[in-house]
Image (spheres, coloured by chain):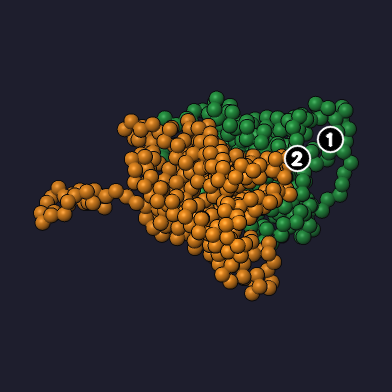
Amino acid sequence: MTAYLVTILILVCIAIILGLALNLQWGLCGMVNFGLAGFFALGAYSAAIVALSGAGTFAGIVAAAVIVAAACGLTALISLRLSDEYLAILTLGFGEVIRLVTLSETWLTGGSLGLPGIPRPFWGWVSEQNYEVLFLALLIGVVFVLFVVLEILIRSPFGRAVRAVREDDTVASTLGKNVTMLRVKAFAAGGAIIGIAGAFHAYYLTYIDPSQFSAIITAYAFMAVIAGGRGSNKGLLLGAATIMFLIEGSRFLKDVVGVLDATQLASIRLILIGLGLILFLIYRPQGFMPEYKLRVSSLIPKNPQSDSPRASELKKEAA
Amino acid sequence: MIAQVVLNGLITGMIIALPAVALTLIYGILKFPNFAIGAMLTVGAYLAFVGNSILKLPMYVSAVFAAAGLALVLVIVNRFVFQPLRDRAAVNLLVASMGVSFVLENIVRFIFGNSALSFDLPIVRAQQFLGLRINFEQIVTAATAISGMIAVYVILRHTPLGRAMRAVSDNPALAAVRGIDRNKIVRWMWVIAGVLTAMAGVLAGLDRAIDPLLGWNYVVTIFAAAILGGLGNPIGAVVGALTLGVVEETSTLVIPPNYRQVVSFCAIAILLLIRPQGLLGTSRVKK
């Protein structure tokens, strides 16, 4: 049972990393990434190929982050002169290209048979039974670091500028922000995080093949971001954890509900994810947790005369 | 040899042209790229399969059944998904359309499973014509696609409904002032999109096996065709689809056939870099 719990928690952590990336790209910057599964695969394959070549697992993570960041940056760069819809279409196309390459270039990716025997970080430091716990601890550390870095990023001038671009890029550029560079940088940063998630996915499973990277991954990540609240990393932790627990927990349903086969259960899960996405968009677009906002009221020192006309006016504006 | 490849490419292009026109119509009126287009095509193919193999109807009756069925499905989806979201930013609609895509595709998977199906049809011998080999399916595809596109052209150009649709596409506020009922126009637009996409589903089902990912395999090419012609421009979408059909088919002479979608992807990437408004489109570049 403990082993099962550790496995679920590892999957939750990987889902959270992926969700944090999408939250940066879509939540914070409003840039839709429908090729998430493809970029995730790119990260996993990059890490696996580098690690299998003997360069070490750390080099694999770095390679995955750099390669996916470059791919994301390039995609954002191609669509920079166009409205957001084109980026969504390009990322979708890019994801398909990655899938076809992983299926076809057998010499590099093993084709549909995949890549077996991927080395794991810190393998041999502890006994084999305890390794998954170590791996989980490592992942929790990564999630923590990424979370803190992203929270700092959101509150930094860069984070504010990026959100300004999301809300109205014309106004942002009038204020002297370089909209193009902001978008490309933010999308590439999200890409680096996707690459890290992919690397850990490959290291955890030690075996990857193209069927692991279906559109389902994109669906889960979008659901996690929208349920948690676009732009809120705390909400994302909640959203991603809830969804992964529901998905993994519903595997037990197969034993309870005898009439449905595995394909049908999988399709029900995706129907529910799709419905959830739509219902959240219509009825609760802000998700469970609101986005961090710098409020004027928090800048005004609290004093007895805080009910001055100007202060209350400012508060009203802020609310 | 080359002529044969170009012919096959044109036929593939005609299958793509139908959903590409649907996509571009939806974009013109609702201003969002509908990522459910692939799943819609799949649903069309399965509806025809139900008509043909389960209800044992003749193929053309099954096609009509599929068209009517998909149109109905889309009107319902529009009522419960796209209409409540219509006044929000386009990004909401496009993420919602991805949600619709998951739902439609997996309802199909739930009912029919993952196995490949095919229509219950007799096999007809291919004809030789001026040294070209033409299948019966190819003749049917060409006839259906061409009449479908002529019908759309006539509706858009020469009927009050078409004028109203173009008006809403151009300037929704002005159209509303002139007394055009936007909801009615949007409903009719979904009916037309449903009929076109269901036709493509039937033709794609004649061409290859029917499985839940049937439509998904066309998605990149459909988007590429619509972008190539300039999103929102129906004639452009047809030209884009035929071009891509021929280019994809010709590319199989030099690169492996499973990279066909990559060719389409590269086509949009290059086009967006040098001519973002599409080959026939007007400027949609961000300021």
Q: Badge 1: how crowded within 10 Å, few (<14), some, or many (20+)?
A: some
Q: Which amino acid does label 2 sit on?
A: Thr
Q: Label 1 belongs to which residue?
A: B134
The answer to whether B159 is drawn above or below residue A148 in the figure is: above
Q: Colour of chain B?
A: green
Q: Residue at x 13, y 50 (%)?
A: A309
User: Looking at this view, is A133 or B126 the one in front?
Assistant: A133
Q: What residue type is labelled 1?
A: Ile
Q: Distance between the residues labelled 2 and 1?
A: 11 Å
- Looking at the rendered structure, which numbered label has been put on residue A263? none
Residue A126, percent from left and from top: 58, 60
Count of labels in the image = 2
Q: Mark 1 lies on which chain?
A: B
User: Looking at this view, is B158 or B225 the one in front?
Assistant: B225
User: Looking at this view, is A197 or A251 the one in front?
Assistant: A197
Q: Which residue is drawn at 72% across and 45% down?
A: A110
Q: Do labels 2 and 1 share a chain?
A: yes
Q: Label 2 belongs to which residue?
A: B141
Helix, strand, or loop for circle 2?
helix
Chain in orange, by letter, is A
Is residue A283 visible in the rendered image? The answer is no
Residue B150, percent from left and from top: 66, 35
Q: Is residue B13 left or right of residue A268?
A: right
